[in-house]
Image: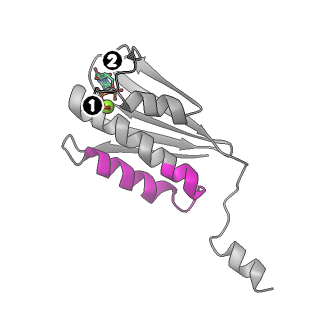
Amino acid sequence: MSQYAVELPRSPEVAAAARSRLEDWLAAEVEPPLLGTARLVVSELATNAFLYGRGTIEMRAVLEEDRLVVDVSDEGEGFEHEPRERDLEGLSGRGLAIVDAVASRWGIRNETTHVWFELERARPVGRQPAAAGAAGAAR
Ligand SMILES: Nc1ncnc2c1ncn2[C@@H]1O[C@H](COP(=O)(O)OP(=O)(O)OP(=O)(O)O)[C@@H](O)[C@H]1O
Ligand SMILES: [Mg+2]
């Protein structure tokens, strides 16, 4: 199991920062599609923390053999999520619907605001050297 934690900037760059830190941590360890999904979802959570939350924004990630869990927190008092009726004209209210669509599980914890999501990994992948495939092919 690997664990990571970082403070993110409370600025419009928050989503880009969240994506690049996640990539720095995980690129060598997880399958690319999972990293892509995690980058998408964390962008929504980081943007929400900047737009609607307060105080310090932090991102934590826990990587296990069979799942990745990421939590984005701010120092607001939490919120209730009510999925909105589909409004095809509306330009907002889509972020958490995306999270709901792609995450295995997700939720909001409200001591201060924490929004977390879990992505299941397709199969247990141990730490493999990046060159493992190439070495096999060269045999
Ligand atoms: N960190 C947060 N702190 C407080 N409220 C939040 C937080 N994150 C989300 N919310 C609330 O949940 C609502 C729904 O979030 P969601 O990301 O689904 O939609 P949106 O941010 O309004 O629009 P979009 O993400 O499509 O641009 C937000 O409008 C906001 O009221
Ligand atoms: Mg949003």
Give the structural element (helix, strand or loop) at label 1. loop
Judge depth for marks 1 and 2 and give the one in front: 1
Disc 2 residue lies near ligand 1 with CB under 8 A: yes
Q: Is residue 101 left or right of residue 49?
A: right
User: Which numbered tag is attached to residue 2?
Assistant: none
Residue 28 sits in quarter: bottom right
Please give the name of the residue rendered at 23% of the width and 26% of the height, measured from the top-left corner: 52
Cβ of mark 1 under 8 Å from ligand 1: the answer is yes
Foreground residue among 99 and 6? 99
Main secondary structure of the magenta stretch? helix
At a point 43% along the width and 40% down the height, the residue shown is: 41
**Residue at image point 43% right, 48% down:** 39
Magenta extent: 14-36
**Quadrant in which the C terminus is drawn:** bottom right
Query: Where is mark 1, residue-wise?
Result: 91
- The numbered mark at residue 78 is 2
Identity, as a three-letter code, of the amino acid under mark 1: Leu
Asked whether the residues under the numbered discs 1 and 2 touch, taking CB atoms below 8 Å apart as contact, a structural biologist would say no
Ligand 2, what quadrant?
top left
Is 37 in the magenta?
Answer: no
Q: Quadrant of residue 44?
A: top left
Residue 104 on image: x %, y %? 59, 32
Decide: is 18 above or below 54. Answer: below
Residue placed most toward the observer, 83 or 122: 83
Q: Secondary structure at mark 2?
A: loop
